[in-house]
Amino acid sequence: MSKLLRLRGCGYSSTPHFGSPVLPNRTSPPKEQNCDYLSNPLNAVLLSSALQHYINSDTPSDGRKIHTHIIKTGFKPNTNISIKLLILHLKSGALKCASQMFDELPQRTLSAYNYMIAGCLKHGQVQESLSMVRSLISSGQRPDGYTFSMILKASTCFSTNELLPRSLGRVVHSQILKCDVEADDVLYTVLVDCYVKSGKIGYARTVFDMMLEKDVICSTSMISGYMSQGFVEDAEEIFSKTVEKDVVVYNSMIEGYSKSIETARKALEIYVDMQRFNFKPNISTFASVIGACSMLAEFEIGQQVQGQLMKNEFFKDVKMGSALVDMYAKCGKIESARRVFDHMPEKNVFTWTSMIDGYGKNGHPNEALDLFHLMQECSIQPNHVTFLGALSACGHAGLVAKGHEIFESMERDYSMIPKMEHYACMVDLLGRAGSLEQALELVLEMPEKPNSDVWAALLSSCRLHGDVEMANLAANEIFKLNANDRPGAYVSLSNTFAEAGKWNDVTELREVMKLRRVMKDTGCSWVGTESGL
């Protein structure tokens, strides 16, 4: 590839640079200057200076009166003034005026294109920015590194836009090579980030290895990509080779480690190491470390983290409080979770949901439902997970009527369509109470085809109450959906047959399991010791 297009030595480059100071330390134009460009014959130098002042000011929209005056006097601005007017409109948020100014340019330079592309992206108009790039190429001009970096950023920031091609990163990469643009470290970093966020970690690594100087930003992106796909050793390799580390790269490692029980303890080790090297943990650090404590059920370490949190401003943050509530609840310390909950100055839906779910999973269904009602009285709108916790609590408490009321209130009061998980909870609730016919009726009347979780809830209830016929029906539906992925269904049906004394059916089912090579999952338990789990 040939050398990257360099910035030109004229009044402005191809890279938008809205903030270059021309008239420093001023908040408004001098009085004499206002009089000069509004009352005297228009002078290009004076206009350029006045426009640049407003571009650099905190109130660029005040400078739009200059454009009005230009139009009234019939003055024909040169390319330099036209582009500054374009920048002024963009900084004022007037994209339509900027677009009109761009269309009237006597000469559309690369700088003008880049300003317009940046403006479109700033206003979320991704398709317009891509159209502008195509127009730039069609005009015979070559995009530079800044043009491509903007489009790559758009592909990551607006990745949920259905109109964007999924392979936009690769398309831009090919254009970089086609236009013979030598990518600098900034462009390489954006390209790596684009590939990482689109899940193309292999392409990202190829670009990463081409970089002469790998900065911490690019390394962090690679680490996050590897961790998200479970390539822990590759992430560790990048981390160990990163010379100048910062808090963000440490956070990437801690967050990645905290997602798995196998690596969660390493998250705590990195947390200690970063402080040894005088890196101060931030709110993201604490959130990931608390998550690791939840994963390990290490509430003692969680208490130490809470003690450290109480010494800084993060302790009052609602995210930290919610994380602590969730951690204590998952560790079985429901009283500690409630204590944190009660002392939080601010609570959001996640805080309430964590506490409700914690009560339910720790055998306190009545407290969970009381808190659910209190949440509604406080005008906090539940989300889908909140309803799951409340329905699960009803199931454990045997409150069928209450469960029905909560389930129906989802759509009636909150316009929430119940998901498969909610139907599974309702089937479990009815099944536990012995209302198997009602449970089956609910399954058959579902607006969508029931998944294996719904049928598994019914099968579990059938085994509990010894209903062999319905258990057989539920199991067969599971086998149709997941013949080999639900070995528990075979075991549950086999046990139901055995408890009913149908040994021939047990033998026949076990032969089917052998034929389909269905293996029962190995059971395991956690045992707490001084060194951990």
Image (tube, rainbow, N blue to C red):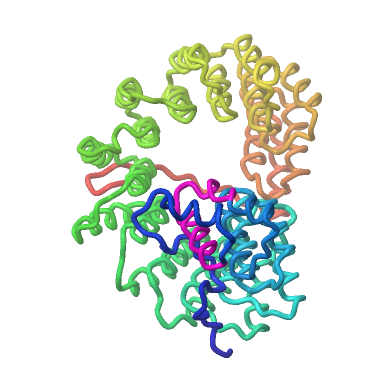
Q: Looking at the image, which is closer to me, 283 or 6?
A: 6
* 470 sits to left or right of 487: right
Q: Residue 263, percent across and down? A: 38, 56
Q: Residue at x 56, y 75 (%)?
A: 145
Q: Which residues are magenta?
A: 44-65
Q: Residue 501, percent across and down? A: 67, 28
Q: Residue at x 43, y 18 (%)?
A: 364
* 283 sits to left or right of 407: left
Residue 220 in view: yes
Indicate whether residue 35 is drawn in magenta.
Answer: no
Looking at the image, residue 54 lies above or below residue 223: above
Q: Looking at the image, which is closer to me, 180 or 476?
A: 180
Which residue lies most toward the top here? 401
Quadrant in which the N terminus appears? bottom right
- Name which quarter of the figure residue 314 lies in: top left
Task: Tell me the chief SS of the magenta region.
Answer: helix
Q: Residue at x 71, y 70 (%)?
A: 106
